[in-house]
Image (tube, helix red, strand yellow):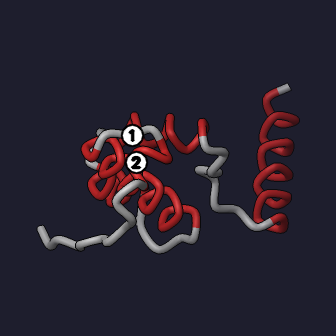
Amino acid sequence: MKKITLTYPDDFELAVHLTPEELDAQIRLMAALKMFELGKVSSGKAALLAGIPRTEFLEMCGRYRVSVFNYTPEELEAELQTDLQSLKRIE
């Protein structure tokens, strides 16, 4: 794996009330969430970046209000219409 170095003020950990390890984990998670939200990486790759299992990453998406569904409004409408038609055939 490659490594990125981040420089921050000496009192930053104190300001955010995190240990260096917690800060590292939080920054990795935030980067992973944003990259996933922007469609740059899959949820699996984002989980690897965050250093957590994919299931936990998906839970974090919910906690931080990052949608796991990548539908445009038009795609969602088409999907819903297809589902409604399928339900009508079942009835």
Instruction: Locate residue 25, reporting x and y percent.
Output: 32, 47
Q: Quadrant of the N terminus?
A: bottom left
Say left or right for 15 vs 28: right
**Picture layout, residue 57 above or below residue 43:** above
Residue holding disc 1: 18
Q: In which quarter of the image is the C terminus?
A: top right
Instruction: Please count the marks in the image.
Output: 2
Residue holding disc 2: 26
Numbered tag placed on residue 91 in the rendering:
none
Q: On the image, which quarter does residue 62 sit in?
A: top right
Instruction: Identify the residue at the far left of this view.
Output: 1
**Picture layout, residue 90 above or below residue 68:** above
Element carrying mark 2: helix
Q: Residue at x 47, y 74 (%)?
A: 40
Q: Nearer the viewer, residue 73 or 3?
A: 3
Element carrying mark 1: loop
Q: On the image, which quarter does residue 53 sit in?
A: top left
CB atoms of marks 2 and 1 within 8 Å? yes
Q: Residue at x 37, y 67 (%)?
A: 8
Instruction: Locate residue 76, reporting x and y percent.
Output: 78, 58
Say left or right for 91 vs 52: right
Crowding at label 1, few (<14), some or many (≥20) Cα neighbours within 10 Å? Answer: some
Q: What residue type is labelled 1?
A: Leu
N-terminal of the two: label 2 or label 1?
1
Q: Which amino acid does label 2 sit on?
A: Gln
Q: Residue at x 86, y 52 (%)?
A: 81
Distance between the Cα atoms at labels 2 and 1? 9 Å
Q: Nearer the viewer, residue 8 or 80?
A: 8
Crowding at label 2, few (<14), some or many (≥20) Cα neighbours within 10 Å? Answer: some
